[in-house]
Image (cartoon, coloured by chain):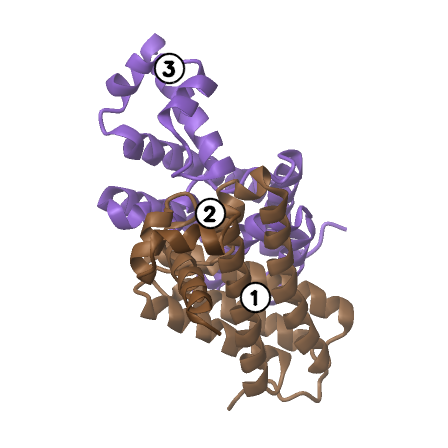
Chain colours: A brown, B purple
Amino acid sequence: MGKRTDAKQKMVQAAKQLIRQRGYSATAFSDVLELSGTSRGSVYFHFPGGKAQLAIEAAEAHAFEQVEIIDRAADQATSASQLVEVYLDLGRDAMAASDYARGCGVAPLITEGAAQDSAEIAETGRRAFSEMTDRLAFHFVAFGVERASARVLADAVIAGVQGAMITSRALRSPTPYDSVRTVLASHAASVSPKSTRRTRA
Amino acid sequence: MGKRTDAKQKMVQAAKQLIRQRGYSATAFSDVLELSGTSRGSVYFHFPGGKAQLAIEAAEAHAFEQVEIIDRAADQATSASQLVEVYLDLGRDAMAASDYARGCGVAPLITEGAAQDSAEIAETGRRAFSEMTDRLAFHFVAFGVERASARVLADAVIAGVQGAMITSRALRSPTPYDSVRTVLASHAASVSPKSTRRTRA
């Protein structure tokens, strides 16, 4: 991994951070260069596809991290219900740590219409949410939840986390995460096999 | 209500539509003028506070409509669980009717950092989500749900709808709405008084 790869990674990380804070449209290449401390020449070398390519790679990096976080949460859990609780708590803590300033790295590509202007961005958004949902569903099945219920629960967890990210920022409060956690964990327990341990206590 | 008020209302409606489709940053005054068929002179007359003021009024209009939709859903329901189902179905149908192109009229002000740049926008976002959540909680209490559980359920419904709006657009599928509906309606039934009719059938 040479200097050029380092510069590229720095730019992707900087783009991800800025997109999470202020979205896609308001993130300019110049801001990415400033935050990452890279030179303008790197942009065209590493991202011949321009801002769309940078945003796609940032969204992919974000989705990859989320899948890792889901796996870590599953490692700490012994039931579907606990996985929901740990995953929501991680989201809540990260949101509070950012002082309610950091949202999703993928959602802005959808809500700002970028996905409607570019088939490649649309495909990135679709794949990112599919990957996170599939991974959660995989773990729910491993904890004994029936496949169809695991899909429904995974959809609801991803939607709940996405929504909590928005309302928590708007209200500057962790409460939406706690409410989503309560509702989804109780549902997870209700679709789990009775023998599964349901609570940490 | 004279011509000027008509022009103002048209501009607010156009801004709301564009913000729901492409967010806040990518919505330019010129697009609002074109869509609403109003003249440039009207902008400075009706919105001396500029784009921020236009977006604030559009977000307020959106929140007002959502509260009306919640009230209509409550009128059609005979239980908390049914209210969740009707509200989610209305959201799902509207999303499909927009061909997965229309999101929330408030969320972009939060996710694009506008709320961090303007205390007035931040207050608008906070109030909009509080109004929707309060209204849902009010109806859940009316259907017999205990106050604390009604708050938790209302938070989860608003977050679930916000999240479904994003993942449904990303996947171009109504499935997230259906999954959120299943999970939240089953939780609503579990916190409802046993005498309440729980299903439409």
From this view, report whether residue A8 is shown above or below residue A143.
above
From this view, report whether residue B15 is shown above or below residue A178.
above
Percent position of residue B50, x then y? 26, 28
Residue B16, image quadrant: top left
Q: Are marks 1 and 2 on the same chain?
A: no
- In the image, A113 versus B89, the foreground residue is A113
**Is B136 positioned to the left or the right of A159 in the image?**
left
**Is A84 positioned to the left or the right of B54 in the image?**
right
Find numbered disc 2 in the image and state the secondary structure of the residue it sits on.
helix
Amino acid, disc 2? Lys
Q: Which numbered circle lies on residue B7?
A: 3
Percent position of residue B72, x then y? 55, 38
Q: Which numbered circle lies on residue B191?
A: 1
Q: Earlier in the sequence, mark 3 or mark 1?
A: 3
How crowded pointer 3 is (Cα within 10 Å; few <14, some 14-19, many 20+) is rated as some
Percent position of residue B36, x then y? 44, 18
To which residue does mark 2 refer? A51
Q: Quadrant of the N terminus of chain B?
A: top left
